[in-house]
Image (tube, grey):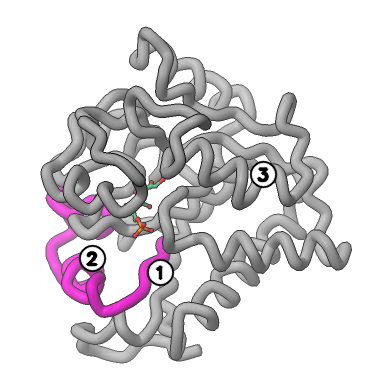
Amino acid sequence: MKIIISKNHAASSQAACNKIVEIINEKPDAVLCFAGGETPLEIFQNLIKMKNNDDIDLSSVHFVSLDEWGGLGYDTKGSTNQTLYDALYTPLGIDLENNVHFFDGKATDLQAESQRILTIVKELGGIDISLLGIGMNGHLGFNEPGADLELEAGIIPLDPVTKEVGKKYFDTELDLKVGITLGLKTLLASKHVILIANAEKKAEIIKATVEGEVSNAVPSSLVRNHASGYLYIDKGAAKLLGGHHENN
Ligand code: F6R
């Protein structure tokens, strides 16, 4: 895994965006799996600027969904669905009908819903770029600490840390119990995995990701063994790292 440390979150988001654009330019029909949450929002804005300036052609990419809170859909502010449609797919002018494949967190059979998206991922030939925010507990998507390495897609009970941290996304208190997610097996099979994190509050989990044991106890650490894994962080998130890493 290559580690790129930038002076601030804006520079880190630009660097990660440049990497994404480089990969899409090489493969204009790339399959993209992007996290919601707060960390990627500046990357999304950068991509939208580039699209508006005609600096990138996204007409052939496909977006597949990474995750969703069980029970939520577009109508709940803070759902992954609403975040990605409003902050990314719609402003980018992506063909929502044909080129976006998203989990319905309100499906009555969430297990079947997870397999529906997994089948689409497979039909598309797998994921080219997984852009993953690192949770405070090291989760990737909703692959919580201890997640099954063999899971391709499924339903995962939310870790207490995720329930607590998740409150920041919502206006009202919600009783969230599970996440629907692509599994570690599918994410780690992506051609490129780009991890992102910022701010000092993530410094401890970044240290565990980079310098701790490679183990599903900290799912983000598993990307260290990926042939094309990247970690884009700012100085705050890098604060506890020893050793020499590329600065940007
Ligand atoms: C959201 C998602 C989560 C977040 C992670 C970091 O779709 O997949 O795994 O990426 O919890 O969240 P933020 O970026 O809000 O710190």
Please state the horizontal and vertical placement of residue 52, each as a whole percent of the image: 83, 62
Please state the horizontal and vertical placement of residue 78, each as a whole percent of the image: 42, 44
Magenta-colored stretch includes residue 210: yes
159 or 173, nearer to the observer: 173
Q: Residue at 53% across / 39% down in the picture?
A: 82
Q: What residue would you read off at disc 2?
A: 209
Q: Quadrant of residue 85?
A: top right
Residue at the farthest front position? 172
Magenta-colored stretch includes residue 84: no
Q: Secondary structure at mark 1?
A: strand
Q: Amino acid at mark 1?
A: Leu
Which callout, 1 or 3, points at the residue further toward the start of the chain? 3
**Mark 1 or mark 3, which is nearer to you?**
3
Q: Secondary structure at mark 3?
A: helix
- What residue range appears in magenta? 195-221
Q: Vertical placement of 102 versus 164: above or below? A: above
Q: Quadrant of residue 59?
A: top right
Identify the mark at residue 89; answer none if there is no mark.
3
95 or 119, nearer to the observer: 95
Please state the horizontal and vertical placement of residue 231, each as a whole percent of the image: 40, 69
Q: Amino acid at mark 2?
A: Thr
Please state the horizontal and vertical placement of residue 109, each as a whole percent of the image: 36, 9
Q: What residue would you read off at disc 1?
A: 231
